[in-house]
Image: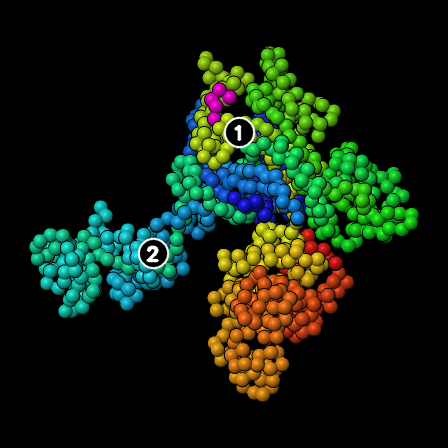
Amino acid sequence: MQPLKNWSHPFKDKDPSKDTRNPLLQLTHMAKAAAGYYPLGRSGLFHGGIHFDSGTAGALDQSSVHCLADGEVVAYRIDTQAPTTAYSINKKTVEKPFSRNFVLVRHYLQPPKIKGSPDTPPSLTFYSLYMHLQDWSVYHEDPTLTRPAFWPESPVRRVKQTVKDVRPGNLELRGLNVRTQDRNGKVIDLLPRGAEVTVSGKGDMRKLENSLGPANLISADGSLRGYVSMSEVLLIAGDDYYVKALGGSLNVYAEPSFHSEVLMELPDGTRFTLSGDDYYRKLERIDQYVHFASLQGEQKPLGPDRVVVLDTPVAIKAGELIGHLGRYQESGAEQPEQKLHLEVFSGDDVDSFIKASRDWAQRLPEKDRTWLKLAKGTAVVPHQNNVTAAQLKVLSAASPLSAADLLIPKRVLDGLPADRKIQVTASESRKVSNWYRLEGLLHGADNHLLKGWVREEVGVTPWVSPWSWEGYDIIDEYDVPQEFMASFLRAVKRLSEAQLERFGPMADEGDTGPLKTRLYDIIDTDRNGRMTAEELRTAISLPAHAQSISQLIVNCESEWYYKAGKWDRLDEVLGHSGSTPHLNWLAEKQRIKQMCWWGEVAAKVGLPAHGEVYYFHPVGLVATFAKTGDLIYVEEFLLQYELAHTSFSPGTHALTTNSKENLRKIVVAINKYYKSFPQKTNIYEVAYMLATVRHEAYYFLTGEFFSEKPEAGNLSYFNKYDSVLASDPELREVARKNGNTQEGDGYKYRGRGCVHLTWKNNYRKFSDLLSYDFVLDPDAAAKFEYSVPIMIIGMSKGMFTGKKLADYLALDKKDYLSARKIINGNDAKVLIASYAEKFEAILKKTSRLPVEY
């Protein structure tokens, strides 16, 4: 299994115009959840995951769930229908559904290798768990609902909703024609849109296997009706025959008699199976064929209603579909709610990994230190108009101080507008420093957010690598549910005096355990005796507290590892006994048992059988690593682009899988180039290059965007580039000057790649630059591994027309219209400029590209 490269938030933005990709804001957004905080749930018990529910839906598109990081799906459960729990409500039994559907993904985390060192970096295997997903019945009833790619394709297919065949007499009903043979066969039936079918064979027309014959011959019990005369049929073999009728068709009779009702006519050539020995024989099956391309494949989970552990795990990329939110109704809830319970955990020795990773981080280059640490006590200077750095330094002495450490990712600072950054150069009396104007990130001693300027003293204010795990703590929490529950009930004043006396010592134990103690250190320094989910929710609305809590790694037993005794120990504190049964608690324990899966999965996927693992905050982990290294955050860029794709120009069709994968390869290649070569760029240059690719590499014959296919046209179309075949002397001379000296060079060196590289001379130039013979192998210039460097080098150095990116695109001059001169004069300059504006907006959210060199 390869180390993961990409990370992704599990949900897309609901409003792409708003920046919810800031990792600190992603953490504070979890305070909006109705329940399910990390690491304490509303019941006061340890909670190893986080919830996305109605509370978080305001800013997030929760219509589908996406994978956190590159990995492989190892197990899942998808019930046909969510089971229910019978609760007693006002002396009535009420059935409440609970989705127990889950997907378990395994990931492999490893720091980057150190250049020139043979040492192997430390590594960690971890898992992401997605609970309470949608039932199979919902997918079955809605064929338009996208299904996860790791579900295998079912032999059952569906007639596409776009088919338009009709039958005479009912022109309103659209469907798919059923024929007697190939495309020239006669039509004998019509399958409605969405009809389920199974087929066999190969080629354009496939044989229907799930139907004995046309619908009007199918009886109520599913058998085939009808009899045919043996006078106009010929034997194929056994009981199989075909129609050879003088009149072109064969009557099908309701009874074995010439005088009975004619049910339909079978065209000449129709094949069928008959039974009986008489002159009129019974129809048993009629061969039918349908157009295969008009059928839609249907993916279906293995083994509905049971836990499936995959013999061969299925690879999944960050941002790819996991599933959709299912229904879950708590015992006290009036209605079911759609929610996701998301966990990240590891069964490895996390303590050893963290220590080894921290040591490794010390050896990594400075560029990998991508988080600025603003320590507790950082001065936050209130903003004043036209303020200078010198004034800020003086004012800082009397300014409010931050009350907690905060790590800020470089991408957030890089993304600040120019008027929110001040750079101070070095002189004899001062060191280099940077001032950043921040809002809503740091808080003061009164827990109110601060606004103003903070100072980075270059070389003093520390930058840290994500691999140093700065601020992370490992807590061994030996989960004792009854102590946590007693602590919770006392905190919310639900214990009587007698119960306080009885359960007080138990509550004290719950309040003084390792986890609660650490939480008090972070968010309740006055120790007022209350540590509940509500206090936690308030705390995580502050970025520094949210970050500190997300840095807690808790070693605890999984709630999906079932032990009856663990939950039975809650009986006493919840008031259940044999003489006074707590019916809803008994029902809840049954629900817990039904949801557990650990025993069926753990040993088969590498998890410990005892159920103890190390828990990580899912969004916190993504925030730590998602924004490192690459200039463009691939998965987030693709998510944002897909949302905007059809808005680029009127009539644009939806982004296909192939087009999206092409764009992924281009962005990966851009990242690779700028990582490998010390060439600087800015957001405007990259936006314009992507706009150029979108225009130049559109393959109109198939509607494929960002295509590797060469310029389209027949052989004669490229004569205009040919020194022999061109239609006039001027064109022939242009071809010669550009190196196309032999007949056929016009076609051979036609446009390829991101900028449609044309002319033999250009192929020769880049052969020298990239150490690959494109003259001998011109098709290679279309491959992204070469065409992306060709684009970047050519547009940066002015190798196509003499004009280069820096002539038009910088912080003080952004001229997307004139930039077209880099490639092709004024051709389509307005359209491409509009593309560049859209790419710029996307890159501002999904990259750490600077606005200046």
**Looking at the image, residue 135 lies above or below residue 710:** above
- The image quadrant that residue 525 belongs to is top right
**Looking at the image, residue 336 lies above or below residue 479:** below
Residue 79 left/right relative to 711: left
Q: Residue at x 50, y 65 (%)?
A: 703
Describe the element under mark 2 as helix, strand or loop: strand
Q: Earlier in the sequence, mark 1 or mark 2?
A: 2
**Looking at the image, residue 211 lies above or below residue 496:** below
Q: Residue furthest left?
A: 278
Q: Quadrant of the C terminus?
A: bottom right
Q: Which residue is mark 1?
A: 558
Is residue 562 inside the magenta stretch?
A: yes
The mark total stands at 2
Q: Which residue is mark 2?
A: 192
Q: Is residue 410 visible?
A: no
Residue 93 left/right relative to 12: left
Q: Residue at x 35, y 59 (%)?
A: 292
Marks 1/2: CA–CA distance: 48 Å
Q: Residue at x 47, y 22 (%)?
A: 564
**Alpha-carbon neighbours of circle 1 within 10 Å: few (<14), some, or many (≥20)?**
many
| In front of the other: 708 or 547 | 708
Q: Which mark is residue 95?
A: none
Q: Which residues are magenta?
A: 561-566
In percent of width and height, residue 3 lies at 57, 44
What is the three-letter code of the residue carrying label 1?
A: Ser
In percent of width and height, residue 348 lies at 56, 33
Is residue 366 inside the magenta stretch?
A: no
**Looking at the image, residue 663 lies above or below residue 724:** above
